[in-house]
Amino acid sequence: MPISKEQIARYLEGRCTQEEQRQITDYLYAHPEALEQVLDEQGWGEEMVLPEEQSDRMLSAIRKKTYGHNRRRILWSGIGAAAAAVTGLLVLSWHSNRQQPSPLAHTQITVQQPVYTTVQVYNGADSTIKLPDGSRITMKPAAVIRYDTAYAQYHRDLYLEGEAVFDVAKKASLPFTVHSGDVTTTALGTVFMVSAQEHAHCIKVRLMSGKVVVKTDGSSGTYLKPGQELAWEQGNRDVAVYAYAPVTKPAAPPVKLPEPTVQISNSHIEFIKCPVADVFSVLYQQYGIQINASSEDLKGCFFSGTLTGQQEADDIIHTIATLNQLTLTKDNTGYHISK
């Protein structure tokens, strides 16, 4: 699993959990260049002056360990020493002010900054988007989602402002994590809601199905079960978990649908919830347009609209085919429609 520079920095500062320490330690042993790069950027491995007696002992130990190794490997030992407090590594590094190796030329490494995609809801209704991994997000008005180009390739981390419901595509190798302020919510495949309004002082996570773990700043994580909601107060940093009451909307009164009708006048033809087969029959009677289709393919297809001439009739035929996902072709005998 790729490790970011920010994670390595926290690792060196001792701000990781035991599980993160294990993962990052394994990663750095396999990719020492990643740690060297972070240390170069942050100025680790600077020279320090020690008492002469202690320096002599350390220098003797280093010569036994590092004879024949280049300076970059000595720097790696220094890196390990810096991290020993959190990883338990037993390593040693020392730079003598009496015998300095000739400096090596540093290769300039250009790190490509990630490019973020930002999705924001401007209208007053919920909007649903589909992410590259197949997950779906129903965003509430004014919600903002942000993720980078590595999403779904190396990680599934994204950032939320506002409120959204997440329907997560299952992908065990890449946990799905939503960052909202100091609260992170991680799931493998589930449906949950996060509410992190910009001016609110409380972040809420509601689990509809599956399983999630919610981590607040400095906590080891709280697991939620379906039907539970977690609330985190930013002021006192308290966490509360409780069962939420599903919102029940009053049943909407039944809507009386208009009866299917066709109104024909001298200037236009109006269709109201007409079966498509009836629409095609009227087009043939009024304009002589031949449309060939089986009744089975047209079953359950309806059309409402108004047309004023043959040109619009041709447009309506194309519209009906598109809306009902039908295949439309035309030859010298007329139109042919099929599924």
Image (spheres, grey):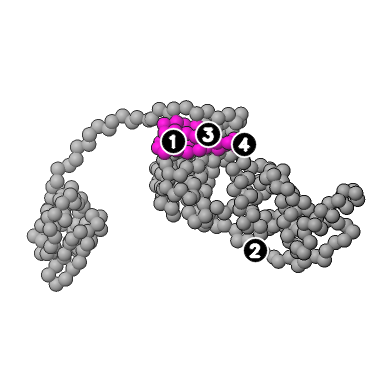
The residue mark sitting in front, 1 or 3, is: 3
The residue range painted magenta reads 203-230
Tell me how far mark 1 sits from mark 4, CA to CA.
22 Å
* Identity, as a three-letter code, of the amino acid under mark 3: Thr
Q: Which residue is mark 2?
A: 110
Query: Horizontal and vertical percent for residue 240?
Result: 52, 28
Tell me how far mark 2 sits from mark 1, CA to CA.
42 Å
The residue mark sitting in front, 2 or 4, is: 4
Tell me how far mark 2 sits from mark 4, CA to CA.
33 Å
Q: Quadrant of the C terminus?
A: bottom left
Residue at the farthest bottom position: 332
Q: Residue at x 27, y 32 (%)?
A: 252
Tell me how far mark 1 sits from mark 3, CA to CA.
12 Å
Q: Which residue is mark 1?
A: 207
The stretch drawn in magenta includes residue 2: no
Secondary element type, mark 1? strand
